[in-house]
Amino acid sequence: MADQELSSGRRGPLTGVSVLEVGGIGPVPFAAMLLADLGARVVRIDRPGEDLSGTHAVLLRGRSSVVLDLKSDAGCAEVLRLVEASDVLLEGFRPGVAERLGFGPDVALSRNPALVYGRMTGWGQDGPYAALAGHDITYLAISGVLDAFVGEGGRPVPPLNLLGDFGGGGALLAFGVLAGVLHARATGEGQVVDAAIVDGVASMTAMQQAMLASGAWSQPRGHNLFDGGAPFYRCYRTSDDRWIAVGAIEPVFYDRLLRGLGLQDLPRDVPAQMDPTGWAQTSELFAARFSGRTRAEWVDIFADLDACVAPVLTLEEARADPHLAVRRTYGDRDGALVQPAVVPRFSRTPGRGGGGPGAQGASDGPLRATRSTSTD
């Protein structure tokens, strides 16, 4: 169905939105990828000699690109020329760098008053840490979130770089600039969107903040409902040294979990499901059961129970999962590169994801007039 929609010439919901992306790593390319996937016309500015292959191949899909020396007068002039024809500019410099290069918000908005100027940083445009370097793990650390991810020996373990760079960073940058575009189209007024990873991650803790205030999150880390403390919301090792994820929060699913484990009649001394004083004991009981069979055997046992139980798959295994295969969650473009599908999915205006970055300086369609400028 998706291929038919794409071949029919139907365009994404962001068709008509023009985005200028100042090349960087992580959050900004991800935001630009999301916008390009949904039909925005994205031009990426690359530095001379940058390698666009490898780890950035998927993040840079769907773009045209130009090569500019941003430290040169000619490069800055070209950026401002592109700004005049853009709805959005995305940059991920430390505060003040774009200003020093000559295309900060004041200059850019003077050239295009309706421009939405998206600024992606770890710490934000102001505050004591604004000028400091950082990465996903340090932003999670300061936001209070990293402490909740407990590893062996109580050592905090970062959830890859998904939560900060992409969840609290790039995704919210894309959300913010789209809100800015709506305002600009209604009023003609552009503005600056200050997207900081620490702010984005903090916003994602809204539920945990409420739980803290109500006393529902009061135990040490690793002893709460969503951090692995609850026996019905954690992972268990199987006999083949694989893992099963359990998320049987609601009573109906908890009952089905007990049925699958053969524990319909729990010992009388085991407390009720939501009594934290009994979680350690129940966790040991569940762990002993799960360790008695292989992951595949548990998948078969729970296949028809609908108990919120699932195997923990590797990225390679996930590509072959029957549900994800039917939905083409991981698409394979020409067999060269496995790519996540365009999200979310639109019934009338499907996205157009796929394809890696073009050669430096490459452009197509109405962007052929875009010039490449490099002065070394």
Image (spheres, rainbow, N blue to C red):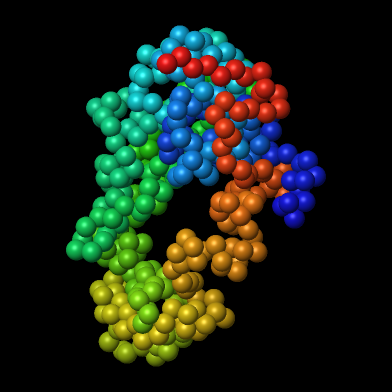
Q: How far across and how far down the image is residue 173, in percent?
A: 48, 35
Q: Quadrant of the C terminus?
A: top left
Q: Residue furthest right?
A: 8
**Snapshot quadrant of residue 371:** top right
Q: Is residue 201 left or right of residue 253?
A: left
The picture quadrant where one finds residue 151 is bottom left
Visible residue check, residue 171: no
Residue 358 appears in the figure: yes
| Rendered location of residue 144, percent (x, y) | 28, 46
- For image coordinates 39% across by 73% down, the residue present is 243
Q: Which image quarter holds the N terminus?
A: bottom right
Residue lying at 69% horizontally and 39% vertically, measured from the top left: 12
How many numbered marks appear? 0
Q: Residue furthest left?
A: 153
Q: Residue at x 63, y 30 (%)?
A: 41
Question: Which residue is depicted at the point 59% across and 35% down?
Answer: 358
Q: Is residue 136 left or right of residue 260?
A: left
Q: Is residue 137 above or below residue 16?
A: below
Q: Is residue 218 above or below residue 311?
A: above
Residue 177, percent across and down? Answer: 53, 30
**Which of the 4 image quarters holds residue 359?**
top right
The percent position of residue 342, horizontal first and vertical second, equals: 61, 48
Q: Judge from the rendering whether residue 62 lies leftward or rightward of residue 107; answer left or right.
A: right
Q: Nearer the viewer, residue 201 or 241?
A: 241
